[in-house]
Image (cartoon, rainbow, N blue to C red):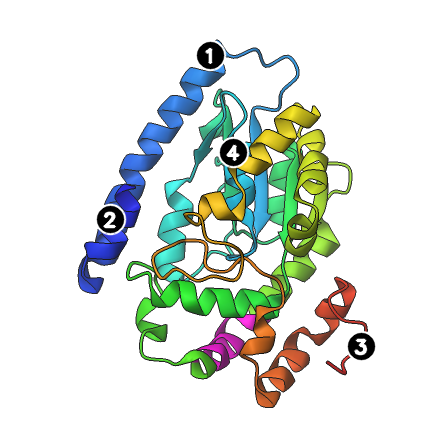
């Protein structure tokens, strides 16, 4: 609630410093709650820390929220990741600090980060024995969602870059600046992730079968997968609940959740934009099953 009010009423020039202040306050509250819950909870069948890796606008916040519905779990966001994102206009190439998981010891937490699957990051996850899920989304839809989200978020580090651009110009800017790095992000996790410690999940599959895919994630984290628990969590975090009662496809300029649909890129891509995305992302779209060839 505090972040939503700040996003709506804080002028752009003050937005990022406000974001840092809110983030610091929020982290202190989160870690205090996570440690309190750790001390009072029965951890015999639980993993204390659940880790989600995914690019921005790939369904990670949705997954984070559903996992945090399990009793005792609290979402946390380390300040190092926020500082890096503001300084570098993104955290998809962020290298986890060596001490990151020791800072979260004795805490019952869900940690969602946009970090890439570098050998360094995968090593830290392996050494800490932390299970994780890697989420993917069609990069064309990521681009569209990213454009609209940044345009209405003054404290986003890219706000000034996108604020004066229409949709086509914004997508061209995304293709020039973020797309190559996002492709590398996907390739890094596909090449380096530990298949015994992690699972992969496409956002589109989560949309198509939310109950089934969330049950698979919950099972990976050794959480309760009874039908009543899974179905209740999914219902509480349906698109309509998260977006204030709107159905998929409807748009709200103040909601974190915009449309939540797959294939929205088709409404915005020109032939030239298609060529740019084929050049940088054509093969990874095929590898992840979004296309069968380059003829789209």
Q: Earlier in the sequence, mark 1 or mark 3?
A: 1
Q: Is residue 251 left or right of residue 294?
A: left
- The question of residue 176 being in magenta is answered with yes
How packed mark 1 is, by other alpha carbons closer than 10 Å (few <14, some 14-19, many 20 or more), is: few
Q: Mark 2, residues whose alpha carbon is within 10 Å: few (<14), some, or many (≥20)?
A: few
For the point 29% across and 48% down, which residue is it?
4
Up/down of 80 relative to 290, above or below = above
Residue 134 % position (x, y) = 65, 47
User: Which secondary structure lies at badge 1?
Assistant: helix
Q: Residue 204 at what x, y percent from top left? A: 66, 56
Q: Secondary structure at mark 3?
A: loop
The reply to whether residue 19 is in sight is yes
Q: Counting residues from the N terminus, which is met first, the one under dot 1 or under dot 2? A: 2
How crowded pointer 3 is (Cα within 10 Å; few <14, some 14-19, many 20+) is rated as: few
> Which residue matches tag 3?
293
Q: Nearer the viewer, residue 256 or 93?
A: 256
* Residue carrying label 1: 39
Mark 4 and 3 residues: CB-CB less than 8 Å, in contact? no
Specify the principal SS of the magenta part: helix
Q: Counting residues from the N terminus, which is met first, the one under dot 4 or under dot 3?
A: 4
Quarter holding the C terminus? Answer: bottom right
In which image quadrant can residue 161 be found? bottom left
From the image, state whether disc 1 or disc 3 is nearer to you. Answer: 3
The answer to whether mark 4 and mark 1 are in CB contact below 8 A is no
The residues colored magenta run 170-180
What mark, if any, has residue 110 been given in the picture?
4
Residue 293 occupies quadrant: bottom right
* Proximity of marks 1 and 3: CB atoms separated by less than 8 Å: no
Q: Earlier in the sequence, mark 4 or mark 2?
A: 2
């Amino acid at each position: 609630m505090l972040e939503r009010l700040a996003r709506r009423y804080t002028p752009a020039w003050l937005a990022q410093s406000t974001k840092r202040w809110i983030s610091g306050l929020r982290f202190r509250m989160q870690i205090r709650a996570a440690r309190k819950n750790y001390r009072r909870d029965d951890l015999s069948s639980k993993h204390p820390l659940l880790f989600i890796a995914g690019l921005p606008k790939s369904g990670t916040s949705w997954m984070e929220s559903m996992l945090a519905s399990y009793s005792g779990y609290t979402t946390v966001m380390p300040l190092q990741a926020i500082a890096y994102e503001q300084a570098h206009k993104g955290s998809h190439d962020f290298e986890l600090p060596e001490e990151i998981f020791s800072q979260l010891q004795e805490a019952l937490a869900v940690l969602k980060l946009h970090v890439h699957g570098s050998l360094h990051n995968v090593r830290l996850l392996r050494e800490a024995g932390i299970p994780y899920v890697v989420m993917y989304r069609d990069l064309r839809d990521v681009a569209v969602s990213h454009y609209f989200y940044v345009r209405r978020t003054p404290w986003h580090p890219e706000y000034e870059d996108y604020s004066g651009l229409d949709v086509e110009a914004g997508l061209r800017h995304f293709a020039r600046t973020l797309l190559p790095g996002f492709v590398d992000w996907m390739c890094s996790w596909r090449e380096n992730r530990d298949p015994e410690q992690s699972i992969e999940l496409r956002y589109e599959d989560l949309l198509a079968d939310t109950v089934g895919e969330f049950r698979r994630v919950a099972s990976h984290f050794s959480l309760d997968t009874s039908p009543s628990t899974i179905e209740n969590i999914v219902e509480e975090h349906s698109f309509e609940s998260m977006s204030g009662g709107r159905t998929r496809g409807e748009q709200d300029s103040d909601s974190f959740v915009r449309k939540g649909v797959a294939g929205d890129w088709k409404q915005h891509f020109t032939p030239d934009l298609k060529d740019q995305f084929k050049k940088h992302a054509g093969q990874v779209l095929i590898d992840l099953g979004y296309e069968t060839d380059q003829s789209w």
